[in-house]
Image (spheres, coloured by chain):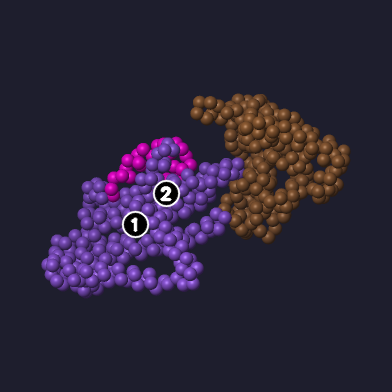
Amino acid sequence: MKLQHVVRSEMDPVSLVRRTDATHAAEARRLARNSAREAQGRSPRGGTFWALSAAGLIAFFGIWWLAASAELIPAMFLPTPLAVARRFIDLLTHPFVGFTLEQHLWSSLQRYLMGLVLAITIGVPLGLMMGWFRWLDYIVSPLFETLRFIAPIAWVPFAALWFGTGMGGPVLIIFAGAFPPCVVNAYRGAKQVDGRLLEAARMLGLSNRMIVCEVLLPGALPAVIAGLRVAAGLGWMSLVGAELIVASSGIGYMMVKGQAAIDTATVMSAMIAIGMVGALIDLLLGRTEAFAMRHRHRARQ
Amino acid sequence: MSVIRIDDISRVFSHDRSGVVALDHVSLEIADREFVAIVGPSGCGKTTCLRMVAGLEFPSSGTVSVDGKKVLRPGPDRAVVFQQFALFPWKTVYENIELGLRAQGMAAAKRREVIERYVDLMNLRGHERAYPHQLSGGMQQRVAIARAYALDPGVLLMDEPFGALDAQTRVVMQEELVRVTRANPRTVLFITHAVEESVYLADRVVVMTSRPGRVKEIVDVRSVREANQWDQYKRIEDVMDLDSFVRLRTHIWKSLRDEHSGTERVAA
């Protein structure tokens, strides 16, 4: 069983986890560079980094604009940035296939939150309990290890069959995307809780319920929150995929209809909205993570 | 009544196909409210002994029982004070002491009363709302002792509780423990590798051999302590200057020394 755990952590679904690791590494390098610079009598210049980020964006939009306006690609297939921006603003007030952009977004967000909350409320307790009750681990693991490699989108046929274009379909698919990281991270977090604390808990006579709620959950909290962040990202990506097929509103639905009408500016507006909302969700959860971790750094000493 | 009976226990750890004998037919009986310290070279299995009484490990043969009941699992009737404190970092001092009482289903008002009593006993007043990481090692171990005492256990098991503390803090804690355990006697099993500590604290000192761990000799400290009235001295250094103390300490020291040199010969 032990080997399997190692393998499991290596194969984490979640390139996002690696991305956070990479971000940490980059942060460490940046700090190292800054302190080196300070040692040389130069102050770290935050402005430089902002300028570089801005340069990246400008270059991106510049190339896009050049490609579109030089008509290398027909405007029907690649609208100019300006056309997309105009369409984006227009969509905020003028309905497209029945709803404005923010109405589509809102209906997407509702499904998203339902699926995500469902995945968290089932996945986190399940993962924690699997980390404590070995029998549960043995029952669930083989099933879970197989199911979690099925891409969320693969559930689309069943989502359509079971729920049609109702709320249930996308919720099921988001659940399929967000559930595995919740379980995996809660499980790994529970396994990493200091064994001495678990011995102390048993010595104090804590019931299993108390051990899960008061020892495993707080002990696994950093891992759980990292898992939520991953789940939120995967869920958001699965949602849009789901709405391309099984929905009658929402941001993904908007894209399908835009494509059918060969209205590429609308498709791109939707893509931009997806990207922005995704980044916003990640930012919020990143803040939550930092907040939850504030005691941990001192506790390590 | 809490009597610990360790009856002919052995413990074999298996490495590959060969077994390493950690404990070899150890027997020991600890009377109600008796304070017994086990000293021995590292790796002699003294901690394993304690963990078996705690129900955290089990003998390969032989039995461990408390009050005639075989030990099958850990429980609040046998409170453990761990070397690394094992306090819950996300709980305050108050909540750490409270957790075991809540597990017993004690009412909130009663819990408060009990916690106050042990906070006072261990001189923790004013630190109830602190988190463990905000406290020094000595203070953390006070919390762990208060947590153990609050369970009102028949048996207290202390696994090198002062091993992680600096020398000065250690002395203070030893004096405190003498004060607390003389006033609130429990059946205590105390593991240490510090000879002075064992003589200062215990009624009887069990000297163990190096691996495989056996009982080498059992030294009666209590009769000497009472005959020479050690308890009239508040400070450890005054006790440690007494001839009666020095004689006992030197005796145990020599007994252990043979074991240490034995280990070194094997190692060389």
Front residue (pair A167, B146) = B146
**Residue B32 image point, x, y percent:** 74, 35
Tell me if I can see residue B10 in this picture. yes
Residue at 44% across, 48% down: A186
Query: Disc 1: which chain?
Result: A
The numbered mark, 1 or 2, whose residue comes first in the sequence reads 2
Q: Amino acid at mark 1?
A: Gly
Residue at 74% across, 40% down: B195
Query: Disc 2: which chain?
Result: A
Which chain: purple? A
Separation of marks 1 and 2 at Cα, in angstroms: 14 Å
Residue B27 belongs to the span the image colors magenta: no
> Would residue B153 appear left or right of A136 to someone viewing this image?
right
Tell me if I can see residue B45 in this picture. no
Crowd rating for badge 2 (residues with CA inside 10 Å; few <14, some 14–19, many 20+)? many
> Would residue A63 appear left or right of A179 to someone viewing this image?
left
- The residue tagged with tag 2: helix, strand or loop? helix
Front residue (pair B63, A195) = A195
Q: Which residue is mark 1?
A: A233
**Residue A253 image point, x, y percent:** 22, 60
Q: Amino acid at mark 2?
A: Asn
Residue at 83% across, 48% down: B238
Q: Which residue is mark 2?
A: A185
Crowd rating for badge 1 (residues with CA inside 10 Å; few <14, some 14–19, many 20+)? some
**Residue B264 image point, x, y percent:** 65, 33
Looking at the picture, does residue B84 appear above or below residue B266?
Answer: below
Residue A133 belongs to the span the image colors magenta: yes
Q: Which residues are magenta?
A: A123-152
Tell if the residue under mark 1 belongs to the same chain as the one under mark 2: yes
Say which mark, if any, is on residue A188.
none
Q: Colour of chain B?
A: brown
> Would residue A241 appear left or right of A299 to someone viewing this image?
left
